[in-house]
Amino acid sequence: MTGVSAIDQKPDQKVTALDHARQLLTRAKAQKAAQTQSPDPELAPTTRLTPSASPAEPARFVPSAERMRRVQQALDAGEVDRQLPTLPAVAELLPGAGLRSGAVYSVRTSTALVMAMMAGPSAEGAWCGVVGMPSFGAEAARGLGVDLERLVLVPDPGQDWLNVVAALVDALTVVVVRPPGEVTPGEASRLAARLRTRKATLISVGSWPGSEARLEVESNAWTGLGDGEGLLSARQATVVVSGRRVVGGPRRHQLWLPAPDGTVRSVDPAHEEAPGWPAETTWPEETTWHEKTAWAEGTAWPEEAVG
């Protein structure tokens, strides 16, 4: 796991996780500051010198009307929630066609889907954090596109998890958290205000009050297994998306998670085979549809069986 920043903590060390998180954030903030581009000189509040009415009155610097207009446009644009870089297949799942800064998304039954949601921003240089997931597979995340050089892990924050998440939100772009229990509306509201201020995005592994969208893997089927042999090579997942911004009720999407080539993309029913039916498989003429279906369903695995 080269590059990943992790915080190891014993169960009785409740304060240490927060202190260590703040130390790691110093590094994250420094790199973010170094990567920040200098502002557009055209948007700078350029001033002009206005002669004073009398020699005793000091000269006044007054912004030109055009510069004032440009600065105001920049400030107005800054108030609009920005959209984070998102993998195309993930963007198709989400309302607004992408991850929105200041928003919360909840994901159930699929760590791989969480990793795919992190991959887009991470690949574009965003810092990400994962809280409360000691079994989070960093190598699996890297395989789906997460940059481990900009990943902070806090495996066990204890009862101080909300403060740890708030500290990470101050410096990171995407924060993933698995709450240890039910999140109260008050806790969600306080963190929501912080997310909007910092323009960060939160992904909750589990339910979260007022989330932008809820994503859940309803079913999945793996390919690669033969008759008693083979290796799992790809998975087609049915993802159900619901929530307050999902128009028309819950939607279902077919997703390769991952595809045979390791990528995450939407399934094209017109050109791709059903999971579990390899291209080299041939069927005797007398084989019935029910026999084929029974064989294919034998390759379906629950999410927990693979991790």
Image: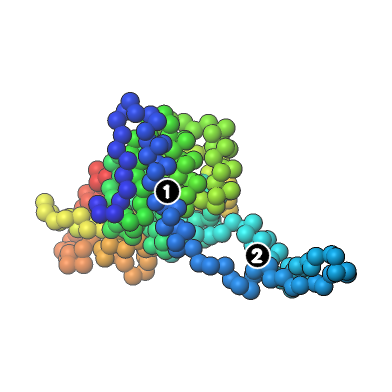
Secondary structure of residue under mark 1: helix
Q: Position of residue 61 (x, y in %)?
A: 75, 67
| Cα gap from disc 2 to disc 1, whole angstroms | 28 Å
Q: Are marks 2 and 1 in contact (CB under 8 Å)?
A: no
Q: Residue at x 76, y 72 (%)?
A: 49
Q: Residues within 10 Å of mark 2 (few under 14, many from 20)?
A: few
Q: Position of residue 194 (x, y in %)?
A: 56, 43
Q: Compare residues 303 and 82 and report the one nearer the observer.
A: 82
Secondary structure of residue under mark 2: helix
Judge whether 236 appears above or below 16 on screen: below
**Residue, far front:** 56
Query: Which numbered circle lies on residue 74?
Result: 2
Q: Quadrant of the C terminus?
A: top left
Query: What's the amino acid at mark 2?
Result: Ala
Judge whether 295 appears above or below 87 on screen: above
Residue identified by numbered label 1: 26
Q: Residue at x 26, y 49 (%)?
A: 300
Query: What's the amino acid at mark 1?
Result: Thr
**Residue, far right:** 53
Instruction: Specify whether residue 294 is in view.
Output: no
